[in-house]
Image (cartoon, rainbow, N blue to C red):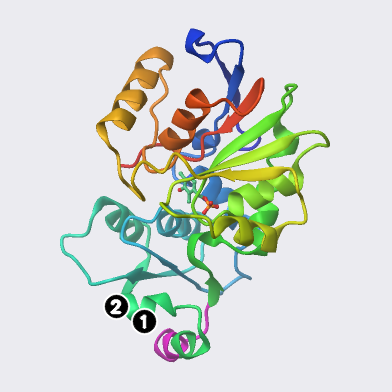
Amino acid sequence: MLPSPLQEIWDERLGGVRLWLKRDDLIDPELPGNKWRKLAYNLPAAGRTVLTFGGAYSNHIRAVAAAGRRFGFGTIGVIRGEERLPLNPSLAFAVARGMRLTYLDRTTYRRKHEPDVTAALRERFGDFHLIPEGGANAAGVRGCAELPAEIDVDHDVVCCPCGTGATLAGIATGLAPGRRAVGYAVLKGASFLDEEVRRWTDARDWRVELDFHFGGFARTPPELAAFADDFTERHGVELERVYVAKMLYGIYARPPGKRVVAVITDRPFP
Ligand SMILES: *Cc1c(COP(=O)(O)O)cnc(C)c1O
C-alpha cells in the first residue's frame, strides 16, 4: 500500500525538466490516494461511528465509506444539497460500502461545523467521531506529511493539486531541507488558500499556483481534456480531471523546477 510508486516520465515537451509521478492513485483500489493519507490518523476508536461531510461527488465521502468497510466502523455521510435519485456513482459506491446518507440544505451546510448543527446531528444519530469535510484537519495534515520521505530521487519541488490545502500543508511540513512544495488550486479565486495552509504548517517553502483552475471546480474545458487525453496516450496514465489534470497542465505550461515530483492524488472515478 505505502510507499506509493514513483514513475519517471520521459517527454520531450518538458525540455530539460525531469518529472516523476508519485502514484498515490495506486495506494489502494478502494481508498483514494490523498484521501487515504488524510484519514490514516483520523480513524475512530473501536466501536465508534464516523460522521463526515461532502458534496454529492466528494472523493472524501467515498474514501470514508471504503475505510469504514475495510476497518469495520460505521459511517454517516452528510451530503450538501437535496437528495437526488438515482444516486450518482460516488454516492452509490458509498452506500454499497455501508454508509448511511443524510442531506443538509446549502445554507445549513455552510454552517456544518458550528455547534448547533453538530448538536442536531448528535440528537439524530447518537454519538459519533466527526471528521471535517475533505479530511482537512491537523490529523489529515500529519498523514500527508509522511509523503515527502517516500521520495527517493533527487528533486527540487513536490507538486500537488489543492482543494482545501491540507495535502499541500502536509507535504510542506514533511519536505526535506532545500526542497519546495507547489500546490495547484482547482477552485477559482482560491486566494484564501495561503491563509488556510499557514494555519496548518509553520513550513515556509511552499506556494499556491492560482492560474490553472480552468474556470472553476470540476470544469473541464476542451483544452484541458485534450491535454489529459494526450498525456494518457503518451504515457499510459489515466488522469483524474477535477484535480490531477489541472496540476499537470500547470507543470507543463510553467515548470516550477528542474526536477519535479507531481503527486497523482487519485485515479478517475468511476
Ligand atoms: C481532495 C482531493 C485533492 C485536494 O486535497 P486537499 O487536501 O483538499 O487540498 C486533490 N486531489 C484529489 C484527487 C482529491 O480527491
Callouts 1 and 2 close, C-beta under 8 Å: yes
Q: Position of residue 62 (x, y in %)?
A: 40, 55
- Vertically, is 76 above or below 180? below
Disc 2 marks which amino acid?
A: Asp
**From mark 1 to mark 2, how far is it between C-alphas?**
6 Å
Residue extent of the magenta highlight: 120-128
The quarter of the displayed image where residue 60 is located: bottom left
Q: Is residue 234 left or right of residue 96?
A: right
> Which element carries disc 1, helix, strand or loop?
helix
User: Pointer 1: what residue?
Assistant: 108
> Quick one: quadrant of the C terminus?
top left
Say if residue 151 shows up in the picture: yes
Question: What is the number of the mark on residue 105?
Answer: 2
- Tell me what residue is drawn at x 62 percent, y 48 percent: 168
Question: What is the number of the mark on residue 116?
Answer: none
- Tell me what residue is drawn at x 30 percent, y 29 percent: 223
Q: Is residue 234 left or right of residue 197?
A: left
Farthest top residue? 12
Q: Position of residue 152 (x, y in %)?
A: 74, 25
Q: 134 or 17: which is nearer to us?
A: 17
Farthest right residue? 177
Say if residue 146 shows up in the picture: no
- Vertically, is 240 above or below 169? above
Magenta-drawn stretch contains 124: yes
The quarter of the displayed image where residue 125 is located: bottom left
Q: Position of residue 126 (x, y in %)?
A: 47, 86
Q: Is residue 63 left or right of residue 241?
A: right
Disc 1 marks which amino acid?
A: Thr
> Which element carries disc 2, helix, strand or loop?
loop
